[in-house]
Structure formats: structure tokens, C-alpha cells
Image: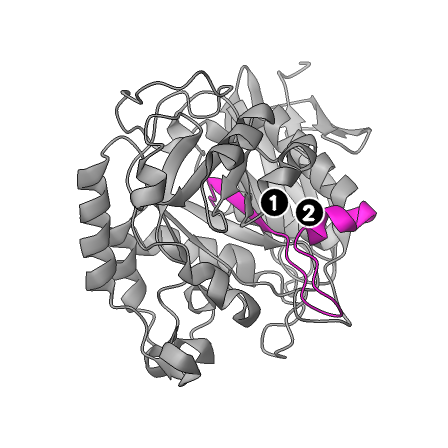
Amino acid sequence: MRIAQICLLSICLAQLQAGMAEGFFQAPQAAGAVKSPFVGLTKTAGEFPIAVWLQDPANAQRFRDTGINLYVGLWRGPTPAHLDALDKAGMRLICSQNERSMAFRDRPTIVGWMHGDEPDNAQSLPQGKGYGPPILPSVIIKDYEAIRKADPDRPVLLNLGQGVAWDGYYGRGVRTNHPEDYREYGKGSDIVSFDIYPAAHENKAIAGKLWYVPYGVERLRKWTDDKKDVWCCIETTGINNANRRPTPGEVRSEVWMALIHGAKGLIYFSHQFKPKFIEAGLLADQAITAEVKSINRQIQSLSAVLRSPSLTAAASIESANAQVPVASMVKRHDGKTYIFAAGMRNGQTDVRLNLPGSGQVEVEVIGENRTIQATGGTWNDHFSDYQVHIYAIGKSKM
């Protein structure tokens, strides 16, 4: 998530952590000891965790209005004023564990701790003398154990860099092309996240290939044996690219592809550095703000569905264009079956979907104001350019 220009900000995020309080996304309450056992963010009732990275608490209400419910990281914080602003907006916080933040340990605003950003990348040397190797996984694990010992009630977030999805990422320095490191890094966290921003990427190997986002999610789940909650970061600005920024549709596609591949939380990256610096770049772009708000509203409306177990081999999807595969996730909740499907490449394809045993049913395409009549549990649809469709299927009419 860290771009070169915010290395100095990230240095201020201490490399320690801990576990989380039950009822995590209920409204913040009056200060008092956090006593509930660690349960994991996405195993609690309430809202789906949707965060924003390293933003000023002065904008907390504006971010809350878009459906974001969590801050990750604070610049030179937390302070009482920071926490009061977050509380007022109903916003929770994951921050570094240090002497300053531990003074507020009893405030339920703080729901987790975090490592410094992207320890898997080459690390800046003092006085601008270049870069050294990444922080060793063994150091991350040791820090993790220390912070869990200091506070066993809050989980620890570890955000990793582009190497999670891109083996050849040169920003890892001497550990470029060493994906085996990530299984070890995952042992130093309760929540493991990563960032890669393909829409705004300037390297031809990645630029425009949105599928790198879900690919990274899939790899982290594999490397952690599905025992950790996997989150991922989503781009909302051009970041360092003054000529290319994600479209609203690309932001939506990245979000839903990540969720379909098993992401349990999201972190929006809001900074813009070129052509000028804007910290809250997400809020500065009206079209992106509106789209993020729409996406988040839809996620929360389906929060209970997303938290339910995924079903394997419950439905089949056949793409007429082999160059545009379609990925899917199937859930059952409250008497309905939900199929979340996304085209995984930039291109067009017609698709045949089948839900065995469902018979003659009406399929609602959520958020698109249309329905499809399925015969024998089978229906056709069209996908274009990383498009996402979400289908809800009730009981058979037969």
C-alpha cells in the first residue's frame, strides 16, 4: 500500500500488534476496559469491515457517509482529539501499538493493531542511503508475539506489498521472485492484507490487469491455509499516475473479484500524489465517491450472506469465450441461493449458468433492476470487461 512518497508516513506506524473485541462493528461505546476474547473481525455480528488507509480523522464523517467504517493507520496518532473525532463518526481504528496508543488501550475505538506497512519490500536505509533487504519474517513473527502478549484481546493486521500477486516485483530487492517468504509472513498476523493497483499501474506487466487483485487474495488464502482472515487494498485514485486513474466500474470490479475469491475485508487507498498531492483523493472525485458509496451499501446489504459459508460445486458456469473465464462464489442464506460472478479478463463473453435442483425459478440480478427466468435451473447472461453480476435465487415455482 505504501508508495514511495509516503514512506516517511509509514515509518511512524510502529511494527507491533495484537487481537480484537467482540461486537467489533457495533457503535463505539463509552470508554472502558476491552474484556472480550479475540474472535476475529469477520466472525463478529454487524457490519462487514471496510477501511480506508492513513487518513485524517477530520474527514471521518465524510468517509463514514460513503459506508467506510474503519480507519487503518494514523499519522502521529492516536491523540484524544483523533479518537473523539472517530467516535463521533462511528468509526473504528486499527493502529500501531506503541506507548502513545497503549495509553488508550481501554478505549473501544481501537479494535486492532498493525505492523509497519509492507515489511516484505526493500527497506529504506537511514539518511537516504538507498535500500536494504526486506524485514525478515522471523522479525515480524517475533513482533507479533510481543504485541499479542501486551494485548491479547485485539487482532493484528499485516499489510504486504505487490509481491503477493507479482513474483517479479522489483520493490522486494534481494527477495524478488521469492514467493515462499509469504507463508512465513502470514504467521505474524491475525489478518493479512496486501496491495496491488493494476488500473493505475505504470508497469506494462500489471497495467490494466485487474485480475491481479483477486489473484493475490487467492494466494494469501493458500499460503495461510485459510486460517487467517485475508483482506486486500483497493485503488481509488491515479496514485502516482497523472494520466490514468481507475474508473468507477474498475473499482467495483476489483472489490467484487476480491470478495468472490474470499477476501474478508477491504481497505481503500485514497492518496493521490500526481499531478498534485491530495490525501483524501477518494473524496475529491465525485464519481469515485458515489461509486464507493454504492459498492459499500451493497456489501452491507449482503453482509450476512457474505459471512455465510461458501458452497463448493453448488453451481456451474460455462463461458463461451475461453479468453474470458468467469469466477464465482455460491452462498445460501435465509432460504435463498446467491451466486456472485465476475468476468476475470477484459473482454466479452456469453455465459450459461446452472443451479442444479432449482427447477423453474426467477433469478433476481441484484442491483441491476432486472430478473431472468431460469428453466431447469439454467439461464444465460452476458459479461463484459471485468463485469460483475450477483444473482439471488429463491424457491422453485414448480
* 323 over 80 or under it: above or below: below
The image's mark for residue 256 is 1
At label 1, the amino acid type is: Trp
Is 36 on the left or on the right of 229, as rendered?
left
Q: Are marks 1 and 2 in contact (CB under 8 Å)?
A: yes
Render colour scheme:
one colour
Give the distance between the C-alpha atoms of the residues marked 1 and 2, in whole angstroms. Answer: 6 Å
Residue situated furthest bottom in the rendering: 129
Q: Please give the name of the residue rendered at 35% of the width and 43% of the height, measured from the top-left corner.
A: 100
How many marks can you see?
2
Look at 22% across and 53% down and name the residue there: 143
Is 252 drawn above or below residue 208 in the view shown? above
Q: Which residue is mark 2?
A: 252
Could you tell me residue 35's position as x and y percent? Answer: 27, 20
Position of residue 102 measured from the top left corner of the image (x, y, whole percent):
31, 38
Q: Residues within 10 Å of mark 1 (few under 14, many from 20)?
A: many
Residue at 36%, 40% in the rendered image: 101
Q: Nearer the viewer, residue 105 or 40?
A: 105
Q: Is residue 3 left or right of residue 181?
A: right
Q: Quadrant of residue 118?
A: bottom left
Please state the horizontal and vertical placement of residue 141, each as a whole percent of the image: 21, 55
What amino acid does circle 2 point to?
A: Arg
> Dot 2: within a 10 Å radius of its alpha carbon, few (fewer than 14), some, or many (20 or more) residues?
many
Look at the image and say whether residue 271 sits in the magenta stretch. yes
Magenta stretch bounds: 262-288
Q: Is residue 8 magenta?
A: no
Disc marking residue 300: none
> Which type of secondary structure does the marked residue at label 2 adopt?
helix
Res. 324 image quadrant: bottom right
